[in-house]
Image (tube, rainbow, N blue to C red):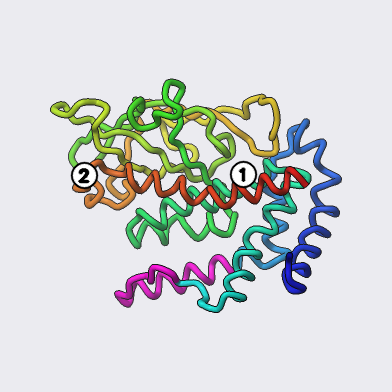
Amino acid sequence: EWSDSQLMIRDAVRRFVDEEIVPNVKELEHGDLPPYDILRKMYATFGMGEMARSRFEKQVAAEKRGEKRKASSGPKDPAAQADQAAATLIPIIELCRHCPGMVTAMGVSVGLTAGAILSKGTLEQKERWAPDLLSLDKVGAWAITEPGSGSDAFGGMRSSARREGDEFILNGSKTFITNGPHADTTVFICKLEESDVDPRDRKILNFVLDRGMPGFEQSGALRKMGMHSSPTGELFLKDVRVGMDRLLGGKDALEKKGGGRESAKGTFQTERSGVAAMALGMVE
């Protein structure tokens, strides 16, 4: 059962959902209302953006001092651990009682996109893109799925990066990309063109793209069977030229065996507890 302190969190979130989301569910799910302004209001109401920026600033300060992140930086007290988990999971459950797509939109932006930059990026890249994503000031998309590769995301991937000195030419398309139509910042996952390597085994690279870059097109929202409060779209890249500063991890990423395969798989793992909480909210 939830503790008294956890019930206070639940009731506060539930009030916000009843006042701000329930009256807009029809427009969110069957109209043309994107979820981001309501999510930003939730972040402002509960101070989530400020907390995210504060945690980020402390992390960056520690990195600049040369301190390595501990394997587990959370509280050691079991009750405190439970409160920390509850504070993360309760909002997911409560949102999913009415509008699960909003959680997907939020999770992909804050969890997957910002998470990928924080785990793979250089310090400069983290400072450049992560704060606005963590606070939901900007919307993020994490682009891996392609028209011809779903479960076989890496083997069947055809999106490519051709290296020209310290620049890359990106080409390819992605589909079913959460936040794709509205993303300000997109982590684009593709393969390095390597003439002497089998296409299925080429290095996986991650690039950070900004809306409006020449050759980068974001489609409108796709019509789906449900969860329209999570806008989903397609991405098209034709000869998009980027510098080394947009390659997550910089030149070091080129030296890693297999590139970003394992780190991309790790990004998927972060979804699991959140998806379970979503399911519980839907059942309720």
Q: Is residue 281 above or below residue 1?
A: above
In this rendering, would 253 be left or right of 136? left
Q: Which secondary structure is most common in the magenta stretch?
A: helix
Per the rendering, the mark at residue 105 is: 1
Residue at 45% of width from left, 72% of height from top? Answer: 73
Residue at 20% of width from left, 26% of height from top? Answer: 198
Residue pointed to by mark 2:
257
In this rendering, would 243 be left or right of 97? left
Q: Nearer the viewer, mark 1 or mark 2?
A: 2
Task: Identify residue type, mark 1.
Answer: Ala
Image x and y of residue 132, in percent: 53, 57
Check disc 1 and report its element: helix, strand or loop: helix
In this rendering, would 204 be left or right of 81? left
Task: Identify residue type, mark 2.
Answer: Lys
Residue furthest front as drawn: 1
Q: Is residue 148 above or below residue 217?
A: above
Q: Is residue 132 above or below residue 196?
A: below
Q: Is residue 262 above or below residue 46?
A: above
Count the marks: how many?
2
Q: CA distance from mark 1 to mark 2?
A: 32 Å
Residue at 69% of width from left, 40% of height from top? Answer: 34
| Quarter of the rendering containing residue 91 | bottom right
The magenta stretch spans which residues? 51-72
| Quarter of the rendering containing residue 163 | top left
Identify the image quadrant of the N terminus.
bottom right
Image x and y of residue 18, in percent: 84, 53
Residue furthest top as drawn: 148
Image x and y of residue 74, in percent: 50, 72
